[in-house]
Amino acid sequence: MEYELRHSARKFWIAIAFLGLTTAYLGIVTVHYLAEYFSESSEESDLIRATRLDPGDAVSFHNIGRIELLARAKPQMALPWLETATRLNPHMASYWVDLALARQAVGETALERQDLLYALEAAPRTPEIAWQAANLFLAQGSPDDAMNAFRLVIENDPPITSLAIETCWKVHPDVEFLLNNVIPPNADETFLGFLRSRNQPAAATVWEKMYSLQQPISRPHLFEYIRDLVAHQQAAQAALVWRQAASMAGLSAYQPSPQNLLVNGDFSLEILDGGFDWMHQKTRGVTLALDPNETHSSARSLRIIFDGPGIEDAGIRQLVPVEPNTPYEFSAFYKAQEMDGAGGARFALQDLHRETSFFMSEDLQNADFWKKVSGSFVTGPETGLLVLRLARVPAGSPIRGKLWLDGLQLAPSDRRIAYDERKLQ
């Protein structure tokens, strides 16, 4: 009997202990649930309840600080809340940024800088944090710290690289400094794109670095750079960039030679529509295509179909760097069928910037065989860049028919003659 009583008492106290533990556990769970529930509220009173229920949760302290800082514009009131949030969770970079904002508003510059450095330390590869820090450093008057933060942005966030580079240039427009301290090599192409239309000498410095490192460049960006150099009448620099880009943009096959300054003159390569290859502008009444069925110098030719009035040229042209006061010789082969209309199409070579005409071929009339057309000329004293095009003479008159072109060549007369003599030997 006594044993049964002792056994029953033990079971009772075990049940009481279990009930107590269960009650305590449910209490803790309830407190955490309520704390989490209140922490998700946008009401400051609920957030304060959350901090009392769970004083170790940084989220509620941070949210209260943001309300004071942003919604109520009371940075001094926000400071203790934000300071507590960073103390509870020093690894959350956004907490440090908000604390730095509050410091800036109350004029605590030294502490603001330290908070921003903590933010960057907490998230060294997060471009959003680096972007905010960089701009706060600028507002604070700390350009060196800002440049370091902008470098993190440029290294890690391609979508806003252009904006970061533009800001850096406004603050410190020194290309050497930016290349050495701010712009990482993976952003040199973007930096070149930013400078090419704003500062040609600075863009040339960026290009020299890219060439020295043999950094790849996309063809569209290269074509844009060439186009800007041409627009600024820097033909020599444009030609140099084109040659140097041979390995950087896969353009080795698109280089001129001493025997032929024209690129892709036999149309054996795809037309790039940029740089110093052929460029095509869609022209009403003109259809262009590469034709493997009519060939002369390579496995295909350029076929041009004319059908309509209002045509001034065929819409195909090429820019050719040349030397001033230099004799040149041009030649090409063509076939033509069913050509109809007054005059005809003619090869035309002229100074791109001065529109001085140096060569105009005869009319390319019907020919059922590959017929050669050629001529010579001397460039002007200021000529550095020619444009070769297929002109309609008289311009605008109706013309119909098919024309094939192949084997186009342009070279200084002495080199061309020597080259032809070697071929005959």
Image (cartoon, rainbow, N blue to C red):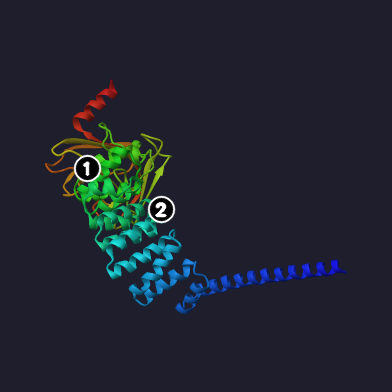
Question: Up-down: is 72 above or below 182?
Answer: below
Q: Secondary structure at mark 2?
A: loop
Which amino acid type is shown beneath numbered disc 1? Gln
From where the camera sits, is residue 238 visible?
A: yes
Query: Quadrant location of residue 9?
Result: bottom right
Query: Disc 1 versus disc 2: distance between alpha carbons?
Result: 38 Å
Question: Up-down: is 289 above or below 81?
Answer: above
Q: Residues within 10 Å of mark 1 (few under 14, many from 20)?
A: some
Q: Quadrant of the C terminus?
A: top left
Report the residue at 38% width, 70% height from top: 80
Report the residue at 47% width, 68% height from top: 59
Comparing 203 with 414, the one in front is: 203
Which amino acid type is shown beneath numbered disc 2? Arg
Q: Residues within 10 Å of mark 2 (few under 14, many from 20)?
A: some
| Residue 25 location (% of width, % of height) | 64, 69
Residue 327 shown left or right of residue 346 in the figure? left
Q: Secondary structure at mark 1?
A: helix
Give the numbered dot on residue 125: 2
Residue occupied by mark 1: 237
Report the residue at 81% width, 68% height from top: 6
Question: Up-down: is 60 above or below 228?
Answer: below
